[in-house]
Amino acid sequence: LALLAGCIPGMPALQKVAARTMQLSTELMALVEAGLLWRFPSVFVPGMITWDRWVWAAAVYESRVFPAYTLPAWIWSDAASPSNVWESCGVMIPFLDMLNHEDETAQVQWSTSNEEDATTKRLNVVTDEKTKKHMQIYRNYGTLDNEHFMLQFGFTRMTNPADRVRIAWALVDGVGGVAPPVDYEPVSDSDGIHSSHLVFESSDADSLKAWWTEQRISLLGKATLSNDDTLDSLRKGKKITFCAFNNGKIDPMLIAVAVVATLPPEKVAEMFQKSTNSSSSKPLDGLILNKTCQHSVRLYLSFLFAKKLGKLLQSLNSCLKDHFNSVQLWTKASSGGLNYVASSDENAMSVEGSGEKSSTMMGWQSFFDTYAWYSTMEVEQRYYSMAPDSCVLTLYDGHVRSLQNSLDIMATDAVFNGNVKQQLEDLGCTLDNTSTTPVTMDIKPVVNVQPVVNVQPVVTPAAAPEKGPEEPVTIKSADESKTQKLSPPKKEEQGNGQEDGNKRDRRKERNKGDRPAAIKLHIGNLSYKTLPNQLYDFFTRLYGKDSVLECHIPTERDTGNSRGFGFVTMPEPNAKAALESGRKHEMDGRILKVAESNSAGTGKGGRQQQPGRCAPPAPSGDRCTHCGYRPRWCTCNPNMMPMNMGMGPPHDNIYGPG
């Protein structure tokens, strides 16, 4: 309750807890005053009914009750109680009251077509999966967010795709023709768009009135299907709410707001005339968005999500540091956002607004992995938080992750178009990706400077002198004195065979030079439940997004279970940082043993042996570099003899044919 009360996003859940507590206390007092204790003394002995038991009974009942409409009609149609009682109270059925963690399909179906069942009072239940005798049967609770899970059932689900967070928006949050905020840090690819084409927040009354004209507000109402009361409340400075989702989708209403808020004034006047004479069902039918307009929409949504994420992280930081050893969270959307990794540099700069150095800050993902995973339970390959504080942290994780996932969609044009293109077309917008001419706005002219190229004459092959040192070609620009050295064109080789050989040599050298130097690390003491993608995510969170080139966990041939160790291939700088940082690598409750692997596959580029030290032993060549097995057991090479050679083809059925 303290975690919920200390953070702004926890207030709605806290209010529901308070309302539910008042309801339960009122119901209990009503039963006691009605004579529950003295009318049934054989059932309710003195001291049996307590507040804790009453809350427990309510939680068990509400989490396991079946709605009456899900059952066959003959069960409740001829009952003594009225139908409205069945509908309000529901039914509890033994062995069918357990929680179900499947989101996609239900595992229980009712058989309602047999009239004999109504006579014999028998309920037939069909399960979609194989069920052993005396085994509990699960049922489907539907797709619920973590707030519902926590308040109704007392647990939360890690990385729940149904999570979402509400976003409040007002006219002051989208004003064009204003300067960016002082602390503005772009987190998405700007594609060279000038800041005058972008929209930011501004509380300046003149700028707000100049941008949000009556025509633009009217167009906003049509795009969002808002009534006059909603538009009047926006004019008065009130806010409307949208949602950011954790499943990778963007709220269509928020997209409509972003399109209208970023339209240039000329486009607004044009669309206002079209909308008054149009009877199309699409609110923005006929609107053509060129590349500049598309960039403006994407960058505005990126700015909006980044601002909301920063404010949410600041609220969480002020609350959580009082409960978790004075932890300092990274509160910006830049530098990886939730996946921020503190710099190891001792001279790291201080973060604005706090006296802490950036090296002492902790990203949300690192904080969550440290404090929320200790009380999780794995059910059907999903993880659930059981402890109260872990449930609250998982609830907050769903909020910040919804904003981060929405922000990631705005990273580049390719990702943005792949997720939002259909929604823009549903609004009636036509995407013109061929037009690059920006609309008329106040843009400072950019002077195109033509570089002056001084190229030395190239000697023809017929009069070529003996080969000597290659002369560099110098390129100078009129506005800068920097020089760039380019290699002169090489002589054309004579003969196809020699030319092909030289091409192969050049290609080989080029590929060799482009390949980054890498080191394969041996990761020991892994949990047997750790998956390769989890090991990959763990190291990328610690050392950066592009720090892992390959990740592999060998498995047992017969059972397919993990062998308790793995291999992670990293670029040489990242691998050295992992080996020399002295950091404790803890994953799934285990301290990992990170060491340089002595197996094949470590490409260390041009690393040279240090003087005075013996050369390391040559890597063992009798094991497969992919699966780690010896040739007798390896199946990676199709030319190797399989183990069942001469015994016939293997059967799909482990118990043999037939």
Image (spheres, rainbow, N blue to C red):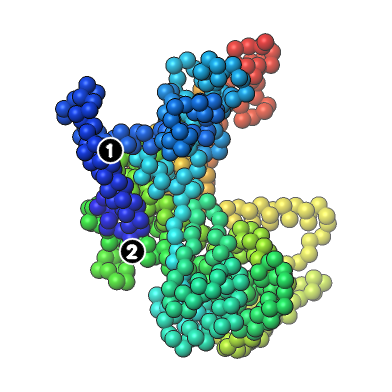
| Residue 457 horizontal/vertical position (percent) | 73, 80
Does residue 317 sit above or below 88 in this rendering? below
* Residue linked to disc 1: 55
Q: Quadrant of the C terminus?
A: top right
Q: Residue at x 22, y 33 (%)?
A: 35
Residue type at tag 1: Val
Q: Could you say whether the residue bearing mark 1 is in a helix, strand or loop? A: helix
Residue type at tag 2: Gln
* Residue linked to disc 2: 314
114 vs 400, left or right, is: right
150 vs 472, left or right, is: left
Q: Residue at x 31, y 51 (%)?
A: 19
Q: Residue at x 44, y 66 (%)?
A: 168
For the residue pair 113 and 184, the one nearer the viewer reads as: 113
- N-term-proximal mark, 1 vs 2: 1
| Residue 359 horizontal/vertical position (percent) | 31, 61
Mark 1 or 2, which is nearer the eye?
Answer: 1
| Residue 369 horizontal/vertical position (percent) | 36, 47
For the residue pair 26 and 500, the one nearer the viewer reads as: 26
